[in-house]
Amino acid sequence: MFVVGSGRSGTSLLRAVLNAHPALHLTHEASCYLDPRGGALAGDGRAWFDRYARSFSFAFLGVPRSAVTDRLDGAGDATRADAVRAVLGAAAEARGKVRFGDKTPAHAQHLDAIAAEHPGARIVHVVRDPRAVVASLARMPWATSSHGLNAFFAAQQVKAVGRFAASGGDVCTVRLEDLVADPEPALRRVLAFLGEDWDPAVLDHPAHGGGDDLPPFPWFSDAARPVGTPGAAPRPTGLSAAWVRSIERTAAWTLREHGYERDTTIGEPSAAARLAAHAADAPEVAASVARGARAAALGLRREPPPPDEALAAVCSVNPAAWAHYPGFTLPPVPPVAP
């Protein structure tokens, strides 16, 4: 099973909730399909894993290399698909779970490859009001500093899942707002889609260790809150009227397909206000593109960069966001056990 969605849509929360189920374990952003060089190694699972095992994504899983290579040794001519299953399966086995999966939001753009390599895989899609998504992304060091770019990228993630579903892909979509306000119906539907029996443990994931293996970053704090409580409710966005209307235009498909209404609590911004908002955003677009390109270039290296260097590059796309986390510094990437 794979949980996908745009960043800051609630995928970490849903993962934590599902991991409270006694049968399920989803890794946190194993990111197995995000390496731009990974596709070339899809036919050679051992070579793929040798490269992947040097990533910070693998390091944060806490899975020993031998737990994966031992599985691959019994897989014959292993492919990337075999290696991915070995990684996810080893993580689940370490927690005494019988079913495995992963939560990586950006896998939304790679669902065709995932479905081809894992026939019958269950895809769970989390959506959130795009205005709230954009406001939240602005606080993330790994997102961009541009409301316009963040709105565009978030809309593309949702559309990618829509295209996959329209082509026959099997997808279960859950709205974050439904998950936090009235979790049981939403979770019963997701578990039925996954073919699992209902278990009330999913309604109290903090008590059942559902998210106790999250990497030590402050932006995951919301995933530790119980669902169905006032403290879990989405917060106001704080966006200007000009940006609310701009995001609504960019995310029109998301609003229409997933039942979000146009904001009727604000007045219509003037043309001058809209122009001023986008003019102020233009330098952020340029800066974000430049910083994002530098981070992406690391993934194109023949030899992967040291994991600490890669993590620092990813978390420098929006340096202004660090003001929201005073006193926090990036921890060193944990070593991978042999």
Image (spheres, rainbow, N blue to C red):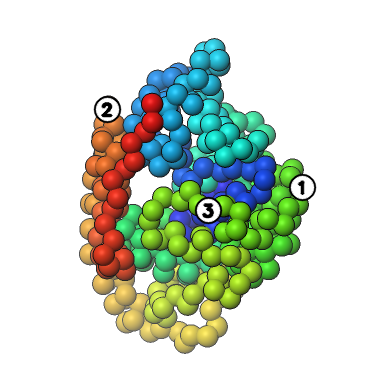
**The C terminus: image quadrant:** top left
Residue 211 placement, left or right of 188: left
Mark 2 element type: loop
Mark 1 element type: loop
Q: What is the quadrant of residue 101 in the picture? A: top right
Residue 10 is situated, as x and y percent measured from the top left of the image, at 53, 59
Q: Mark 2–mark 3 contact, CB under 8 Å? A: no
Distance of label 2 from label 3 (alpha carbons): 32 Å
Identify the residue at image location x=67%, y=42%.
Answer: 23
Q: Amino acid at mark 2?
A: Glu
Q: Earlier in the sequence, mark 3 or mark 1?
A: 1
* Dot 2 alpha-carbon crowd within 10 angstroms: few under 14, some 14 to 19, many 20 or more: few
Identify the residue under disc 3.
211
Q: Mark 3–mark 1 contact, CB under 8 Å? A: no
Pick the residue in front: 214 or 123.
214
Query: On residue 197, which mark appears?
Result: 1
**The N terminus: image quadrant:** top right
